[in-house]
Image (cartoon, grey):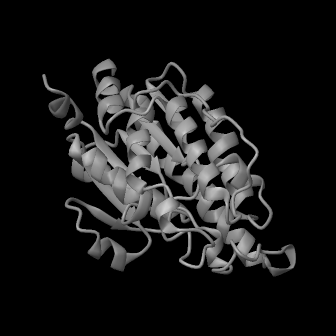
């Protein structure tokens, strides 16, 4: 049996999948034969993304939307095997020039804080709560949570984005990886390793777009994550803050180190191994 035919047996749901990192991961999964469902809150982006298959407009911060999205996937495909929690809100929703002028505490309204945690923290929890029980029942499942670099979490001006990522996609992923050990369901995090060339980094950012990490590079690492046991991975630390004009070079070094840590392969290699093993 070929790798493609094995992968074709799996059904994947990618949140925030209409563009950026999510779209690159969705394309990578489809390229190796998975049936991919794309979820996004932006209906216009879904219409314009050009991906075939089921597209779901939903707010992952809504318990009803999250449960309905998983139910719709299972109704169409019979099950859900792979969940990629990629959807998130960046600091640009507070102020676009936040890279040049860090967002101060006084600028953050209770609604800013609440909404970041609803999407970046609660959203992943709600999607997993809806999807993982079925994976456990079937004895096979893969969850990949897209997080952010350690330095972004702690960098000045990155609250509430950093704290929300630290809560749900770091601490919670480590806990859930242990909880589901031995069930056939794995939970892993994927760290971009630095600023990525998506809308989350505004055009006003003080560095060249060419220095940013391309989303396709993240897709390759996501494929590798699908082939790993559930555990917590963190790129090796190096002391360079995210957000300064010079940080892009350091972020690319961190990304290369994250690649080595992840054992990055060409898209699909890690997934094919995981599918054969499962």
Which quarter of the rendering shows the C terminus? top left
User: Residue visible at 28% across and 28% down?
Assistant: 272
User: Residue visible at 36% across and 50% down?
Assistant: 25
**Which is nearer the eye, 45 or 215?**
215
User: Residue visible at 39% across and 25% down?
Assistant: 139
Q: Is residue 52 above or below residue 168?
A: below
The answer to whether 13 appears left or right of 163 in the picture is left
Question: In the rendered image, is residue 233 in sight?
Answer: yes
Question: In the rendered image, is residue 197 in sight?
Answer: no
**Which is nearer the eye, 72 or 206?**
206
At which x and y percent is residue 188?
Answer: 53, 36
Q: Quadrant of residue 55?
A: bottom left
At which x and y percent is residue 183?
Answer: 48, 23
Q: Is residue 90 above or below residue 33?
A: below
Q: Quadrant of residue 274?
A: top left
Q: Check the image and name the residue furthest to the right.
A: 106
The answer to whether 153 appears left or right of 49 in the picture is right
Q: Is residue 72 above or below residue 252?
A: below
**Which is nearer the eye, 150 or 135?**
150
At which x and y percent is residue 123?
Answer: 56, 58
- Total tally of numbered discs in the picture: 0
At which x and y percent is residue 217?
Answer: 41, 48
**Which is nearer the eye, 250 or 39?**
250
Which quarter of the rendering shows the N terminus? top left
User: Residue visible at 15% across and 32% down?
Assistant: 5
The answer to whether 133 appears left or right of 95 in the picture is left
Q: Quadrant of residue 234?
A: top right
């Amino acid at each position: 049996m070929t790798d493609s035919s094995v992968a074709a047996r799996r059904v994947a749901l990618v949140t925030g999948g209409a563009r950026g990192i999510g779209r690159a991961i969705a394309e990578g999964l489809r390229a190796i034969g998975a049936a991919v469902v794309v979820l996004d809150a932006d209906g216009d982006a879904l219409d314009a993304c050009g991906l075939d298959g089921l597209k779901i407009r939903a707010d992952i911060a809504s318990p009803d939307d999250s449960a309905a999205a998983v139910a719709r996937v299972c109704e169409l495909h019979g099950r859900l095997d792979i969940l990629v929690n990629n959807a998130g809100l960046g600091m640009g929703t507070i102020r676009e020039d936040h890279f040049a002028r860090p967002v101060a505490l006084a600028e953050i309204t209770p609604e800013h804080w609440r909404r970041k945690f609803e999407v970046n923290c609660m959203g992943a929890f709600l999607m997993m709560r809806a999807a993982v029980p079925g994976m456990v029942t079937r004895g096979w499942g893969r969850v990949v949570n897209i997080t952010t670099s350690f330095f972004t979490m702690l960098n000045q001006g990155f609250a509430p984005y950093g704290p929300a990522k630290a809560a749900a996609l770091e601490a919670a992923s480590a806990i859930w990886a242990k909880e589901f050990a031995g069930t056939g369901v794995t939970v892993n995090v994927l760290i971009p390793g630095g600023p990525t060339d998506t809308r989350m980094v505004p055009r006003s950012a003080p560095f060249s777009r060419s220095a940013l990490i391309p989303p396709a590079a993240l897709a390759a690492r996501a494929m590798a994550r699908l082939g790993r046991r559930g555990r917590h991975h963190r790129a090796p630390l190096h002391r360079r803050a995210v957000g300064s004009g010079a940080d892009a070079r350091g972020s690319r070094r961190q990304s290369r180190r994250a690649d080595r840590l992840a054992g990055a392969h060409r898209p699909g290699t890690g997934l094919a191994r995981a599918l054969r093993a499962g």
